[in-house]
Image: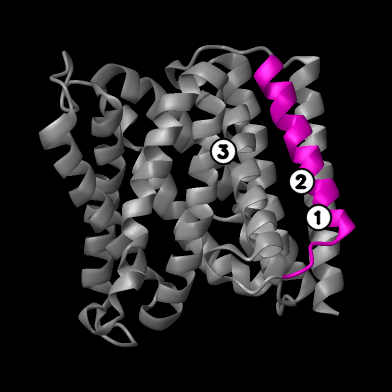
Amino acid sequence: MQSFDEVVAAPAPVARPGLRWLLLPLVILAGMGLSVEAGLLGPLGEQVGHLWATLSIFGVGSAILFLLLLFAGPQKGPALTDLPRWQLIGGFLGPVYVVGLTLATPHIGIAMTMIAILSGQVGKSVLIDHFGWFGATRKKVNGERWLALGLIVAALVLIARG
Amino acid sequence: MLLAVVVLAGAVLSVQAAINGRLGETVGVLRSSLLTFAVGAVSTGLLILFFEPAQAVSLLEVPKWQLTGALFGVVYMMVMVGAVPRVGTAVATVAVIVGQLGMGMLIDNFGWLGNPAIELSGARILAMACLGLALVFMYRSSARQAD
């Protein structure tokens, strides 16, 4: 699960150019994996139910991460129980996304589902900046970002029609 | 209608990424991911107990390869942790999107993994082109703000 928002805060890369181009195919492969994940979810949800398919993702993911963490040894930083509570609510939002994936992919396909997801991410960040929702500082959204949003709406209209 | 649900899911995902990004910085990506997955599993389990109607087929009866989805998610996470500091967030994000859409089109076009085959039409290619242009504009505008 990734967010397009991160592009907005793009830091300068630090690696040597050679290493950079070696890493790129790996990152592209990782992105392909996300589509494979979505491609597995849709048919699974049709058979066993969308919530069960979602549970398979979070259940298996939890188990693997738990094992990785166990063998990775002590972690830096404060204990989870010392954190502000609101930082822990991200976990409730994940299932919304996965259930959305299992519902949509059998009907609109994987590529189009991914475009719709990206639209939501980009649209959200543009609108939040422009209107200052959720206590964000209100920033003027420049012409290029409105143009981007317009293009994304156009892409969605094309999907909805096709 | 379904499209609106998915767009909303994308918006929710980026809210989650914002919260988790901060969490990952303080406690490390392994622990923040485990927390996200564990809370997700527990809340989905509760929803299943109270709201899910009985299904004819259970998770234990489907072919095992259908259950491997989570592996791709975890591998993705590890690759990003390793690659983002070296190639930069912008390049990594674009590479991920290229992989996602390319693979998505392949799966759709050939109906792999038990999905219905959806042929690559002119409208679908046009939609991709619009998204690609939108990403270019987003990137240019954020690069300008950073100056």
In the rendered image, residue A152 lying in the magenta stretch gets the answer yes
Rendered location of residue A70, percent (x, y): 21, 70
- Left/right of residue B9 with respect to residue A118 in the rendered view: left
Dots 2, 1 in contact, CB < 8 A: yes
Q: Label 2: chain?
A: A
Q: Nearer the viewer, residue A121 or A130?
A: A130
Residue B138, image x, y percentages: 79, 56
Range of magenta residues: A139-162
The type of residue carrying mark 1 is Arg
Q: Which residue is mark 2?
A: A149
User: Relative to residue A69, is residue A162 depicted above or below?
Assistant: above
Magenta region, mostly helix, strand or loop? helix
Q: Can residue B113 be seen at all in this image of the molecule?
A: yes
- Asked if residue A37 lies in the magenta stretch, the reply is no
How is the protein colored in the picture?
A: one colour
Q: Secondary structure at mark 2?
A: helix
Amino acid marked by disc 3: Val
Residue for badge 1: A145
**For the residues marked 3 and 1, what is the alpha-carbon distance in whole angstroms?**
18 Å
Q: Are marks 3 and 2 in contact (CB under 8 Å)?
A: no
